[in-house]
């Protein structure tokens, strides 16, 4: 059984980016208002997905075990960075 990488990469990015934002807040403009921090976070995720779509990485098919491993590593990364 094979998956497209779209959903596993989405969940992986949704685990890695919040983990990085929590661990290194100075890297992501922490001394600004909450509204602008939220916009930067959403914009960063949007930019990453645009790059993945334009480079056609999301269209690749991988085995389901690799997809599950990506999802689990994203969740684990987020939990370790807190």
Image (spheres, helix red, strand yellow):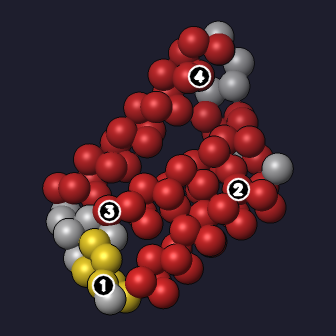
Q: Mark 4 points at which residue?
A: 37
Give the secondary structure at mark 1. strand
Q: In this view, does 61 lie to the left or right of 54?
A: right
Mark 1 / mark 4, whichever is N-terminal: 1
> Is residue 75 visible from the viewing direction of this image?
yes
Q: Quadrant of the N terminus?
A: bottom left
- Whether 13 is drawn above or below 30: the answer is below
How far apart marks 2 and 3 lie (CA) works out to 19 Å
Q: Is residue 5 left or right of residue 14?
A: left
| Residue at image location 23% in from the left, 76% down from the top | 60
Q: Position of residue 18 (x, y in %)?
A: 63, 45
Give the secondary structure at mark 2. helix
Single out the mark in the foreground, 3 or 1. 1
Mark 1 / mark 2, whichever is N-terminal: 1
How far apart marks 4 and 3 lie (CA) works out to 26 Å
Q: Name the residue under label 2.
A: 78
How far apart marks 1 and 2 lie (CA) works out to 26 Å
Q: Return the residue nearer the eye: 25 or 10.
A: 10
Single out the mark in the foreground, 4 or 3. 3
| Residue at image location 60% in from the left, 55% down from the top | 15
Q: Position of residue 43 (x, y in %)?
A: 41, 32
Residues tagged 4 and 3 counted as in contact (Cβ below 8 A): no
Q: Which mark is residue 6?
A: 3
| Residue at image location 50% in from the left, 57% down from the top | 11
């Amino acid at each position: 059984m094979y998956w497209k990488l779209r959903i596993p990469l989405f969940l992986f990015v949704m685990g890695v980016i919040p983990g990085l934002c929590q661990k290194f807040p100075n890297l992501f403009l922490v001394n600004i208002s909450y509204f602008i921090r939220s916009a930067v976070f959403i914009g960063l995720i949007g930019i990453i997905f645009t790059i993945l779509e334009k480079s056609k990485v999301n269209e690749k098919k991988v085995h389901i075990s690799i997809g599950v491993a990506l999802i689990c590593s994203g969740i684990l990364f987020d939990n370790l960075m807190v």
